[in-house]
Image (cartoon, helix red, strand yellow):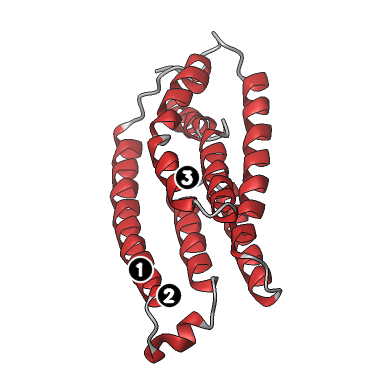
Amino acid sequence: MEKSIDLKEIERKAYLAYHQDGVWDLFIGGGFFIAGIGMFFDFAYILAAVGVALVPLVSLVKKAVTVPRLGYVKFGPERQAKEKRNRYAYMVLLWIVMFAGMFLFAVYSFESSYFDWLRGLGAIPFGFVVVLLTTAGAFLYGIKRLYAYAVLFAVVFLAGHFSDLRLYYFFIIPGAIILISGLILLMRFIRMYPKGENQYAG
């Protein structure tokens, strides 16, 4: 029984360690920062396309930075089943959010008196979508710092709305903060797990 508990604790630490390298933080923060810069220079759509093209880089960086330090980990059946459920749940949420985003863009693009109240909220509905996704990610994957990012997005979008902040700052400010957080996590991860010390390899 004690051995089983120890194995579960090792598996839990390995799982958390894989999410402490800051790679996803760099990607999320960089995505928002680039989107904000794109809005500032009025070519956000081009930069958004570049951001999508860079998504595979996350996997490449993980293989270059994380795997050599932690090794490949094969989780137990319970953890694998949970991960599978989480992926499906998050994919469903992403689809819902995507359609909600398309609806919001349509409402903001075409003038209609029926949605004046919604347009009056400015960027708050978009902020709600971002906060929802971030909070869901924190809940499903157990990455507690995502809750802090959700609070950050909520504060920036609300403060920006009531202070008439330009829209691109809604993305640049949290993007820069998350980027810095990701860099700090990455440097700490590299110091904590030198190459060749694959203590979680399975």
**Tag 1: residue type?**
Ala
Are the residues tagged 3 and 1 within 8 Å (C-beta)?
no
Residue of label 2: 108
Left or right of 185 in this view: 134 = left
Q: Secondary structure at mark 1?
A: helix
Residue of label 3: 47
Alpha-carbon span between mark 3 and mark 1 = 22 Å
Residue of label 1: 100
Instruction: Give the percent coordinates (x, y) of residue 47.
Output: 47, 45
Q: Nearer the viewer, mark 3 or mark 1?
A: 3
Left or right of 134 in this view: 111 = left
Q: Residue furthest bottom?
A: 113
Q: Residue furthest right?
A: 163
Name which quarter of the figure residue 192 lies in.
top right
Quadrant location, the N terminus? top left
Name which quarter of the figure residue 185 lies in.
top right
